[in-house]
Image: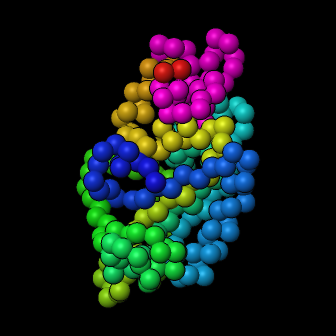
Amino acid sequence: MHEMYDRGKHQGHDIDILFTHPKGEETGFLPKLLTRLEKLNMVLCGSHESSTFHEKVLSEDFKLTARGQLDHFEKWLGICKLPKDFVCGNDTQNPLSNGLETCKEVKGDLDSLDDYEPKAKKQRKCHGENSPFTIAESERDWIARRVDFIMSPYSQYYYALVGWTGSKQFNRDLRLYSQKILNRKLTSHGFYDFTTGKNLPANSEKEVLIT
């Protein structure tokens, strides 16, 4: 899980979970995960987007697309149900815990300007009885949390990690500096050098920032 915790924040408005695998086994994993969560009745609503990545993304398309997408990864942006009675220790109520330690509560701040969300992250397709307004007014023994699952190829993982950690202003400054000063294009998919015509690999967040 990334974003606000990596930036030293103690709370945030959603949970971003970035998946990858050195042998490419992240491919096809997301539908299986969603099926499992749905069987456990943990999914309220969401939007599953297929990968739209192609090599030209690395050197073109400086702006967001018309629908305001964040990047070209396969992803699911949605709202999940979590038990209210989470306690620190071995959680026997949570079917996904497997005896792992859990936290008593999860707090969120919906008003933080630093947690700006692009249009794509707001389109979670929640309507009717599962709309946020209906959920907020209903009596329930669970809490709703906004969750994003992002599937990244291993070769792009550390660029995705920097991009999804944020903040928005930090990413904007990094990308503007790369474009104007270094003659390179930085995205959540890579770091393209227009001088050499090559994409620069990275094996850590540090390499992304000092390449």
Residue 206 relative to residue 65: left or right: left
Residue 102 relative to residue 181: left or right: left
Magenta-drawn stretch contains 164: no
| Residue 22, picture quadrant | top right
The region drawn magenta spans: 180-209
Which of 89 and 197 lies nearest the eye of the viewer? Answer: 89
User: Which residue is at 47% across, 63% downward?
Assistant: 147
Which of 8 and 77 lies nearest the eye of the viewer? Answer: 8
Residue 201: x and y in percent read: 64, 27
Magenta-drawn stretch contains 188: yes
Q: How is the image coloured?
A: rainbow
User: Which residue is at 68% across, 54% downward?
Assistant: 26
Residue 118 relative to residue 154: left or right: left
Which of 207 and 82 lies nearest the eye of the viewer? Answer: 207
Q: Is residue 8 above or below residue 29?
A: above
User: Which residue is at 56% across, 24% downward?
Assistant: 185
Q: Is residue 115 visible?
A: yes
